[in-house]
Image: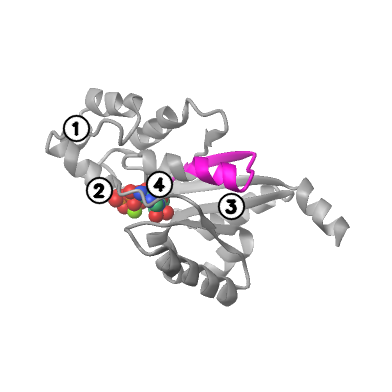
Amino acid sequence: MKEVFEMENRKSRIGIMGGTFDPIHVGHLILGEAAYQQFQLQKVWFLPSGNPPHKRNREGRATDEQRVEMVRRAISTNPHFSLSLIEMYEDGYSYTYRTLEQLKEQYPETEFYFIIGADSLFSFDSWREPQRIADACHLVAAVRNQIPSERLDAALQSMSRRYHSSFLKLDTPNLDISSAHLRKMIRNKESVKYFLPDSVIAYIQEQHIYGS
Ligand code: ATP
Ligand code: MG
């Protein structure tokens, strides 16, 4: 038993924060930092997901390049955050199970902690190949949209049983913030200061993203 524990301990642990990041905001950053601390991760990788061609250059949205640049700026002041372009395929959508299986193959000695909000957890069953995702990582979910903590706990327990895998709770306060709401605020010329890093706000203004 002791041996197993030590083996486990030797494995490195990496957090994965996937998202559209249109734009990245403090909710994403706080989740990444909280997971880093709580699960003693070596690093948290931010993986912006690609948009298929028909979803690119949509009115009121950032381009793929702009989303990547916003992530780059947002994480630049945190030495244990880094950017991965592994999900930025030229031809569009990537699938989480494929990304994780690819990472497992590339880094067989690493345990991956996939960080999500409760809204993503509740739709997990309808993701492509959920069992393969659960087999490839620990799922780490944070409360969102004011759902009671007990409801999240119950969901995590039943998912752990269903997928024979670990679904863990990330201890963060409810953070009432979403990219959709921020896009709307920017369009309406409302201040978004402190909802996202100053460097990202400056970039949004320079590039006139979201009708700013
Ligand atoms: P949109 O409003 O465009 O859907 P979003 O704010 O949900 O944007 P995404 O890029 O879709 O951001 O989210 C990436 C991941 O981060 C998802 O798993 C989502 O649940 C989680 N997440 C985003 N914002 C929060 C938040 N405020 N609290 C908890 N989880 C969050
Ligand atoms: Mg979302």
Amino acid type, callout 2: Ala
Q: Mark 2 points at which residue?
A: 180
Question: Where's residue 78, x and y in %?
Answer: 51, 29
Q: In this view, does 151 lie above or below 15?
A: below
* Image mark for residue 113: 3
Mark 2 close to ligand 1, CB under 8 Å: yes
Residue 127: in sight, yes or no? no
* Mark 2 or mark 3, earlier in chain: 3
Circle 2: element type: helix
Q: Do the residues labelled 1 and 4 touch (CB within 8 Å)?
A: no
Question: Where's residue 3, x and y in %?
Answer: 87, 56
**Residue drawn where x is 30% and y is 47% of the image:** 177
* Image mark for residue 127: none
| Residue 59 falls left or right of residue 203 | left
**Residue drawn where x is 47% and y is 71% of the image:** 155
Circle 3: element type: strand
Amino acid type, callout 4: Gly
Q: Nearer the viewer, mark 1 or mark 4?
A: 1
Q: Mark 4 points at which residue?
A: 50
